[in-house]
Image (cartoon, rainbow, N blue to C red):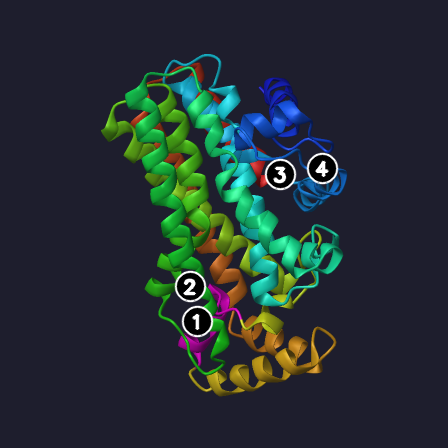
Amino acid sequence: MQSEYTRLLGLIEGEIDSCLPSSPDAAWFKRFFGELPGTPGAEIVRSLNAPARELLGRGGKRWRPLLLMLSARAFGRMDGALSLSPIVEIAHNGTLIVDDIEDGSEKRRGGPSIHLVFGVDLAVNDANLLYFLPLVLIDELDAPAKVKLDLHARYAHHMRRLHLGQAMDITWHRDDDFLPTEEEYLAMCALKTGVLSRAAAELGALAAGAPTASVLALGAVFESLGVAFQILDDAKNLRSGLPGKARGDDIVEGKKSLPVILACRAEPRVRADLARCFAAARRRGIAASEVEEAIGLVERQGAVEASMSRARLLLERCRLDLVSILPPGKGRDELAGIFSLLDG
């Protein structure tokens, strides 16, 4: 199965390159922008896709487009709606560029944040374009008009939800004293992070003509998977760090993650000390001693390990729910295999 994933990921990479070529030609501009009042100059040709290609070139597992393809195959579309596969991945990279600007992050995937390389103006413009550019892939898809309409509606629905989740996250980390409830945090994760994996699963199933009930059930499973991996990322940020990101940068950004919430629940007196650490880390950055102090406060309450345990339980529930939605067979096995791919 791993060899089949590798084959599909190679095809996906080709589709992404087709959407975002490094040197777009006249045919590409016509494909995505229609008839233009003038020919874009060489400087536009060079700069338009450069921020997105820089970020995409730094890696990423590409599991969202793979999920879209496997969902389509599970419901009988054996080409996996390949031409549609980049839609969520491209939009996701747009959200990362914007997220780093909003959070004041300096690193992403092992390099400087995109706005530090290209400037805030070009980064914002390119990130916003990444939300809309791949909609052309729906229009070009070999599918009935009703299916295309449903795909457009579902994509727009999830992009609105994503921005609601981002608003929650931004509002919370601006206030060092504010602490959301666990339920509020999980809702934010579902909207901000889980929504993109849900979108990938649902768009793939829709492209295959799956029944509405099956589309929504599959989407719910992979929304929960996205939440589980967000919890794991939040915990790893405080323990070992994440690839391309500094250990403890969530403290600098004031993130009210599940480990922070559970630590404050276990020992309410920790809350004031964490607020002080957040404020100091925001002022002085990752080198501030309060970053390690905050991590120690959370670790001593057992909150990092408790968060990881909750995430693993949620992942196991997702596996069981997936089995209940799809009949036994190759399609279900391929979709279930994506859990192992992500764990790696």
State yes or no: discs 2 and 3 in contact (Cβ < 8 Å). no
Which residue position holds label 4? Answer: 45
The correct choice, above or below, for 300 with respect to 8 in the image is below
Q: Which mark is residue 126?
A: none
Mark found first going from the N terminus, 1 or 3: 1
The first of marks 2 and 3 along the sequence is 2
Which of pointers 3 and 4 indicates the residue nearer the eye? 4
The front one of 146 and 81 is: 146
Identify the image quadrant of residue 265: bottom left
Left or right of 120, for residue 270: left
Q: Main secondary structure of the magenta part?
A: helix
Magenta residues span: 255-267
Which marked residue is nearer to the observer: mark 1 or mark 3?
Answer: 1
Is residue 263 one of those drawn in magenta? Answer: yes
Neighbor class of circle 4 (other Cα within 10 Å; few <14, some 14-19, many 20+) is some
Kindly report the distance in space between the C-alpha atoms of the residues bearing marks 1 and 4.
37 Å
The x and y percentages for residue 37 are 57, 35
What secondary structure is marked by label 3?
Answer: loop
Residue at coordinates 33% horizontally, 63% vertically from top-left?
183
Return the residue at label 1.
171
Q: Is residue 108 visible?
A: yes
The residue type indicated by label 2 comes to Ala
What is the x, y in percent for residue 121?
64, 58
Query: Is 233 or 26 nearer to us in this picture?
Result: 26
Classify mark 4: helix, strand or loop: helix
The residue labelled by disc 2 is 167
List the residue tagged with mark 3.
344
Image quarter of residue 150: top left
Residue 245 position, x and y percent, is 69, 58
